[in-house]
Image: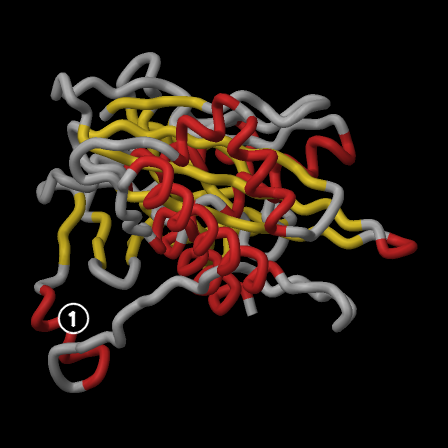
Amino acid sequence: DVCDHALLLCSLFLGFGLEAYVALGEMRCDGQTQPHAWVLTFSTDESTGNQKAAAWESTTGRRTSLLPLDPETARRYDSITALFNHEIFLANVQTSHLLVDGISLDLDDDRLWKSIDSTELGLLLGGGPQHPMPYIPAIADIALLPPIHPSAIDIETELRTLIQRRRLEDHGLLTVWDPELSYMLSPALVAYEHTKLTGQALGNDDFADAIKRHVPKGHCFKGFPTCFPHLQPTRMITALLRAELSADVIATAGDHVRHAIRIRIFSYAEGVSACWVMIAVRYLNPSQPLVTQDNAVPPPPTAAPPPPVAAKR
C-alpha cells in the first residue's frame, strides 16, 4: 500500500535526522489524476542559503526535485493538499494546491499552511496526549554473517572499549559517546561501499544535512571513514592510531566533546568481507564563530577511503 510505504519511508528519514513529511495530494497517471501519498524532505543549499525540497516515491525510492521544481516532478505530481509527520499536521490553505501554479513551501507561514493544534492532534491519535517511548538507536547494524564471524555489534562494542582505554591511558581523557550521531553515520558507510563497487557516487546531501541538523550551533564536526579487509578490532585500533587523521579524531579534547562510531560489514562470496569503520567527533568550537561550512560528512570515495572532514556550525 502506497500510504503505508510513505509512512515507513518518512519514519526512516526522520530517524536519520532529516526534515521529512508525508505529502497528501494527487498524482497524474495515464492522463488522469488520482489521490496519492509520497514523501518530502527539506534541506538548505549551503552555497546560496536557499531552501531545497525533494519528492520521494515511497514504493520505488525514486527521487526528484520539488524545490526548485523539476519538470519530471511537475509531470508526475499534480497537487499537495497537506503535509504531516509525527509532530505536526499542515493543511495547504493557499488559493491553489497545484504545483504548476507555484505553491509556496514556506511551512512557517501560517497564512499558507495551517497547522492543527497539537492537543487536538493528540486527541485524534488516541484520545489524549501521546507519550512516546524513549528512542534509543541501535548500537550497530546486525549483518547477516555466518556464526563463526563476529557481528558488527561485537566489533563496535570492542572498538568503543579500546578507544576509551587509549584516550584515558594516553591522554588522560574520558570518553562520552553520542548514540544518535553514531546512528546517523550508517547511510554514509553504505554510500562508500556502493561507490567502491559501482564507481558511481550516491548523493551525500541528505546525509550531510542530517549531521548539520544534529550538531549544535557553535560546534565542530570531524569524521574519518576507512575500510578493513578483516574483522579484528585490535588490528583496526592499531591502524587507526597509526594514521594521523583518525588518531586526531580519537584524541580530540575540548569542551562538550562527544564521540561516535559506526561499523558496517558487507559480506561477499568465499568468506570475503569489507568492514567499514567510521569514527567521528563533535565538540565546542574554541573560537565560537557561528559559521556553517560545507561537507559536514565526507563524500563517497572514488577508489580509496576519503580524507576526514571538519565542519563548523
Q: Which residue is mark 1?
A: 121
Q: Position of residue 259 (x, y in %)?
A: 34, 43
Q: Which residue occupies 55% across, 34% down? A: 240
Quadrant location, the N terminus: bottom right
Front position in the image: 85 or 152: 152
Quadrant location, the C terminus: top left
Can you tell which quarter of the image residue 311 is in?
top left
Front position in the image: 131 or 169: 169
Front position in the image: 120 or 252: 252
Q: Could you tell me the amino acid type at mark 1? A: Leu
Front position in the image: 201 or 179: 179
Q: Is residue 281 left or right of residue 195?
A: left
Q: Position of residue 165 (x, y in %)?
A: 40, 50
Q: Position of residue 112 (x, y in %)?
A: 16, 41
Which residue is situated farthest in the front direction here?
169
SS class of the residue under badge 1? helix
Q: Which residue occupies 17% across, 46% down? A: 113
Report the number of discs.
1
Q: Is residue 202 visible?
A: yes
- Vertical comparison of 34 with 18: above or below: below
* Colouring style: secondary structure
Which residue is situated farthest in the bottom direction here?
127
Q: Check disc 1: other Cα within 10 Å, few if <14, some if 14-19, many if 20+.
A: some
